[in-house]
Image (spheres, rainbow, N blue to C red):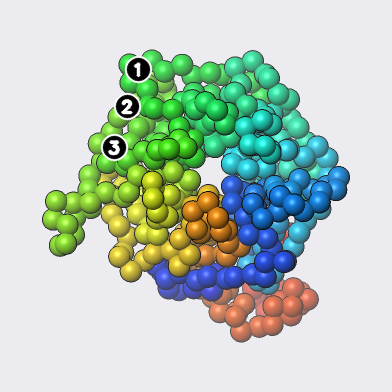
Amino acid sequence: MNLIPSPNAGQPHSFSVINFDNDEILPRSGHRIVLDRHCLYSWGGYNADLWERENDEHTRFPLLRELLEFNFTTGKWRKLTTTGQCPEGLASHTVIKINRHLLHLGGSGVPFGQSNSNALFDLNLDTLEWKCILPEDQDNAPRPKYGQAMVYVDGYLYVVGGTSGYMYDMDVNRLNLADLTWESLVPKSAHVPEERYRHEVVHFKDKLYMIGGGTALTAFPLNEIDSFDIVSHRWEKVLTKPYHRKSRPKGVYPSPRKCHSCHLVVDSMNQENADIYLIGGMSESKIEQYLWRLNLPSLQWTMISPRLRLPVPVYFHASAISSDGCLCIFGGVTKIDSERTNSLQTVWLTVPSLQAMSWHAVCTRLDKAAIMDNVQGLREAGVPEQLLDFR
């Protein structure tokens, strides 16, 4: 469970932006983030301004070989020191958090495309030790690549698409986490989507829904998307429904895009209903700023609100969503091919729980350091234990 005292708790569809000193927290792109308890963890990334910075045994500039932790209760970052065998694919990799473990697959070092990997790494978030749990070149493993999409489903990791830096693919591979064996899922349908990278995949009702993506020169449209049935191994092209508004009576779709992020939110009152949220990304000529959602199973697109737009439009960013509906967006490219940010943007997509709003009120009225230094006093005052577990 994530309990995030976001600055805008109690104000759904209202963005908050936190900016940081560039010397303390470097701007970045191509990284990944996850949420756990009160914290956001950021792993990897790239900063084009660091090509001339000298490396030591622990750094890989212009890539960022660092694990950052942002504590929402204190509002502070920490750079965590990890041990063990650390992955080298630090840009456009994929990560999945399962309990207190961070699984890393793919990504590229520099030069891009010349140092790809298909080994699987595990970071224990309690001990901060990396382990390579599956070496390279296993039978039926995905090709070494970056920009692929990965999703966790019932004990399996599904990996879709990606690029070697020279060629793109639309392979689907599945890893059984119980015995660490890969399986190549050969499509049984005549239709197979075009090869791509930096797309997104979400899982709902035995299907993987693929949103956007592209190549170096193209971005795929969203008036139709592709779904892959994980039982029958068949791809299907699915037509979506446009969003209608007074100024566009014929309807409008989100712009084609790549390097965006997506998250699935299942209706807590109706498990048959879910929404895919679409955040940021780059079309062929601009950075997208509006938030969209695609309803499943109706396949209806909705622009959440013309007034709800990213305060800092980004692509190649990283985002994650808490269990109670707080969307967090960190970093990304803000000016095509040139400028990056270290801003943290948050917005509640649903009405926060009363507990989340109450904890936000406590955190904004008490000194941040006092909260950390007086855990026992807060416990005796009746603050629930799960709010005080700052590990």
170 left or right of 374? Answer: left
- Numbered disc 2: secondary structure: strand
Residue 375 badge: none
The Cα–Cα distance between marks 1 and 3, rounded to whole angstroms, is: 17 Å
Residue 189 badge: 1
**Residue 47, image x and y in percent?**
65, 53
Query: Which of the 4 image quarters holds residue 4?
Result: bottom right
**Quadrant (top left, top right, bottom left, bottom right) of the N terminus:** bottom right
Residue at screen point 37% across, 59% down: 290
Residue at screen point 57% across, 64% down: 344
Query: Which of the 4 image quarters holds residue 246?
Result: bottom left
Q: Which residue is mark 2?
A: 236
Residue at screen point 49% across, 40% down: 198
Determine contact: label 1, label 3, CB under 8 Å: no
Disc 1 versus disc 3: nearer the observer: 3
- Numbered disc 1: secondary structure: loop
Determine contact: label 1, label 2, CB under 8 Å: yes
The Cα–Cα distance between marks 1 and 2, rounded to whole angstroms, is: 8 Å
- Kindly identify the amino acid type of the residue bearing the numbered disc 1: Ser
The Cα–Cα distance between marks 3 and 2, rounded to whole angstroms, is: 10 Å
